Amino acid sequence: MFEIGPDEKVYSVFKIGKIVDCLKAEGVPLHAALEDIRISEAELTSPQTRVSANQIVQSYRNALKLSRNPNFAFDAGSEFHVSTFGIYGLALLSGIDFRKTVAFGLEYYQLAAPLLAVTFEERNATATWCITVLPFKSLDTELHNFIVELQFSALLCVHRDVMGPDFRLSQVQLTSQRPSSDARLAEKFGCEVLYDQPQNSLSYQAEWLDKKPVLGNSVTYAQVARICDQLLTEMKQNTGVAGRARQVLLANLESPPDADALAGELGLSARTLRRRLQEENTSYRELIDDLREQTAIRYLRDTRLTVENIAFLLGFSDPAAFRYAFKRWTKTTPNEFRTSVRA
């Protein structure tokens, strides 16, 4: 798991869209459903729209305020089919080994679950998902319980999409207090629901892990899993302190600020910047090196700039230093690389 700021717009708008659709089905006007989310109706349906965790949370707050359905969270979550999750969902659906599909879902869950920390465990013939709602501004008990119920309902929906309608849970544990409508919730989950528990968990028989997914396809899985890897890498590169640092450095690769100056631009001390980058498994020098490599490849592939000009634009002291660095990155020379990609 890596840090993503609550206002960083890196997530698909699909969750907000589903919440708005469910509210509209109750007769809630669109402007009310979108109150304080700060997106337009057109953005609500655009695959290009990116939203923040705080915007998603605001849609949940709106649902709590406007819906008359006491089971809104569960009912909305049951609309989160794998097709809702884009490429990530397609990867889950096309896996041919359910145990590996679960491992994939856990590794890449940040593409689809921005408000949670998630773990998975197999023990004593039982498979268990546990979720913890991450702290964010104004998280009260009602909102916390809404997020958990929505997420568990969505998890159940996805498992049934992948493994077929016969998939069954064995138990749900919730940290919340028992509500007056608990029998209704147990009926919806199709299993025992326990309250006042130490953690939020969803369990089923581990024998499901050895069964074959309904629509698995190895070729499709390989293709979309690779795309998910690229998406997660891009998300990591554009979020947290490292993401902010990359933006500053990318705009100044010809003459990048040193580590102390970079820290100042980010409003941090040099020591704090080093620590935060270390926590995100990178460093100032690694960021510079990675950005230079990516930019060099793009220049060589997409432009007719000379090697000498590229070296200058990337802040190298001379073309020889650039050629040495490029061969270290790619095991080939700039000219050989350019010839290969244009062949």
Image (cartoon, helix red, strand yellow):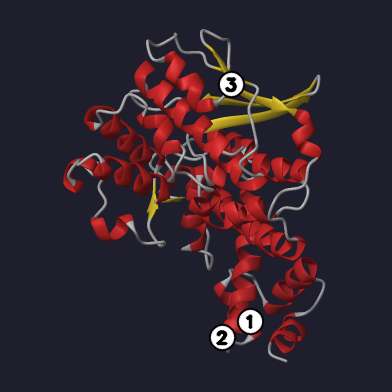
Is the residue under label 1 in contact with that under label 3 (CB below 8 Å)?
no
Crowding at dot 1, Cα within 10 Å, few <14 / some 14-19 / many 20+, comes out as: many
Where in the figure is residue 163, as x and y percent of width and height? 67, 44
Quarter residue 33 falls in: top left
Q: Is residue 249 rendered to the left or right of residue 164? A: left
Where in the figure is residue 183, as x and y percent of width and height? 45, 15
Which secondary structure lies at badge 2? loop
User: Alpha carbon of mark 3 to alpha carbon of mark 1: how far?
Assistant: 58 Å
Q: Residue at x 77, y 70 (%)?
A: 330
Is the residue under label 1 in contact with that under label 2 (CB below 8 Å)?
yes
Q: Is residue 107 rendered to the left or right of residue 43? A: right
Any part of residue 270 in sight: no
* Dot 1 amino acid type: Leu
Q: Is residue 195 above or below residue 116?
A: above
Residue to which mark 2 is pinned: 303
Crowding at dot 3, Cα within 10 Å, few <14 / some 14-19 / many 20+, comes out as: some
Q: Residue at x 68, y 27 (%)?
A: 204
Residue to which mark 3 is pinned: 191
Which numbered marker is on residue 223? none
> What is the total number of numbered labels drawn onto the structure image?
3
Any part of residue 254 in sight: yes
Residue to which mark 1 is pinned: 300
* Dot 2 amino acid type: Thr
Q: Earlier in the sequence, mark 3 or mark 2?
A: 3
Q: Residue at x 32, y 42 (%)?
A: 22
* Dot 3 amino acid type: Cys
Q: Residue at x 45, y 32 (%)?
A: 150
User: Alpha carbon of mark 2 to alpha carbon of mark 1: how far?
Assistant: 6 Å
